[in-house]
Amino acid sequence: MACPGTFSDEPLSPAGRLFLQRKTDVVIHCIARTKNPIDVDGAKATIMSSPMGQHPRFCSLLVRDENGFEHWRKTRLDVDRHVIVVKNRVYEDEEDDEVAVNRYVADLSVSSPLSTDKPLWEVHLLTAHKHIVFRIHHSLGDGISLMSMLMASCRKVSDPDALPMMVPEKTTEKRRDSPWLLGSMWGFLKMAWLTLVFVLEFLLRTLFVSDRKTAVSGGDGVELWPRKLATAKFLLDDMKEVKKAIPDTTINDVLFGIVSCGLSRYLDHRTPNALHEGLRMTGVAMVNLRAKPGLQEISKLMKDNSETRWGNRFGVILLPVFYHKSGNDPLEYLKGAKVMVDRKKQSLEAYFSYRIGDLTMTLLGTKCASLINYKLLCNTTFTISNLIGPLEDITLSGNPISSIKVSTSSLPQALTMHMVSYAGKAEMQILVAKDIIPDPEFLAKCFEDALLEMKVAAKEADKA
């Protein structure tokens, strides 16, 4: 089937070129668990008729001209080359479907590049496990773009003709500072100062300063080490209960608090009394730079002049967490997380990180920019992201979806975490270098227990 449009070559974006470099080659994995058996022919037909089968990026080959510059070249899409059907159980010794699929995706996360003789995506249908695994190269788009496209292919369970509900628009009230001019000036000065501090820190962390080594640290070459994948599961109602304990707290604040608390608990278990109080571990967090937060309407993403346009439109911020010995009030982790995230929100660190990357690509070239990005990952401890998924139950090709999870291929960090919320639940995929973190299931439990401890503490604080 031919893709719509002309067959002229189109140059890659700077971010797209970055994700194709050897040290920063990243594939996004999206796992969807279905409630009913998978209809292979129906799935292929849905792909071809959906935005995924029609989108120019998904029916274009990656080609390089005589000067080595990458372009997208339209081609005819052969869905049979992209849909990989696995009829048998992927591991005969593993009875649990979720564990088996996590193991399957972990194996794909290391040294399993997508073939460049076809558009850079695949769909694996694990029919014996009732799981669908989407493998999509990061050069095609970021998490917001790809999840929005997937949602455009889905429908509501409650209304088979309706698209899934996107994130509701937020209404914000203007603060009435008194006097307003003084408040505005102070806000601007604070933003400028925090931006200066955080951008300088970003540059130092990228080029010179590295986290102290702990039991969860990675480093140069660790992206080639074998991986394990585990899932931490949360209820959004529990996270909402916790965020009530501190005014103006968000789900992202709660997630960051969970990670801070859970990592401290895990390190206490792995290396008791080995770390000093307040030890810093730096996280790399992705921030959507589009004007509208959350999932986007696919029609708006496709407009070149849209502020929500398709592609890799994200910046990076550094989020430090600090080790504390067991016994601390779990809400203290949340308070610390909120203070740090609020400061980051008041700065332009994410925007400047995006522009710095763009400038580096322009002045020094893609390879140099890739090495700098790789060094940042080597100098930090983990990567984390949070994506708001559908608000209600959905179907794909008429098959109800019970779970949606996201991860990426391996990075030089030994620990990467990606959370997606779906219909009142949130699941975080924890991808680890198994020779460094051999027990990611226990780490996932540390995160789950951290939320439950915060919930109990929040209820007690509410009674007091």
Image (cartoon, grey):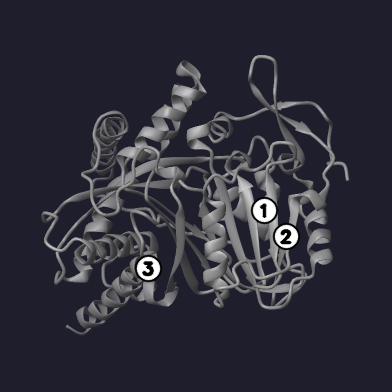
Position of the N terminus, as image quadrant, is top right
Closer to viewer: mark 3 or mark 1 = 3
Whether residue 277 is visible, yes or no, is: yes
User: Mark 3 vs mark 1: which is more N-terminal?
Assistant: 1
Q: Amino acid at mark 2?
A: Ser
Q: At 82% across and 36% down in the image, what residue appears?
A: 75
Reading the image, the residue beneath label 3 is 444
Reading the image, the residue beneath label 1 is 149
Position of the C terminus, as image quadrant, is bottom left
SS at badge 2: loop
Are dots 3 and 2 in contact, CB under 8 Å?
no
Q: Residue furthest right?
A: 1
Reading the image, the residue beneath label 2 is 153
* The quadrant where residue 181 appears: top left
Q: Is residue 53 above or below residue 88?
A: above
* The quadrant where residue 64 appears: top right
Q: Nearer the viewer, residue 208 or 320?
A: 208
Would you say 359 lies left or right of 133 here? left
Are dots 2 and 1 in contact, CB under 8 Å?
yes
Q: Amino acid at mark 3?
A: Ala
> Residue 212 has which mark?
none
* The quadrant where residue 311 appears: top right
Tell me if mark 2 has few (under 14), some (14-19) or many (20+) residues whose alpha carbon lies within 10 angstroms of its own.
Answer: many
Tell me if mark 1 has few (under 14), some (14-19) or many (20+) residues whose alpha carbon lies within 10 angstroms of its own.
Answer: many
Return the x and y of residue 421 as percentages of the image width and height.
50, 66
Q: Is residue 411 above or below residue 355?
A: below
Return the x and y of residue 314 as percentages of the image width and height.
49, 41
Whether residue 167 is visible, yes or no, is: no
Return the x and y of residue 146 as percentages of the image width and height.
62, 51
Closer to viewer: mark 3 or mark 2 = 3
User: Mark 3 vs mark 2: which is more N-terminal?
Assistant: 2
Inter-mark Cα distance, 2 to 1: 7 Å
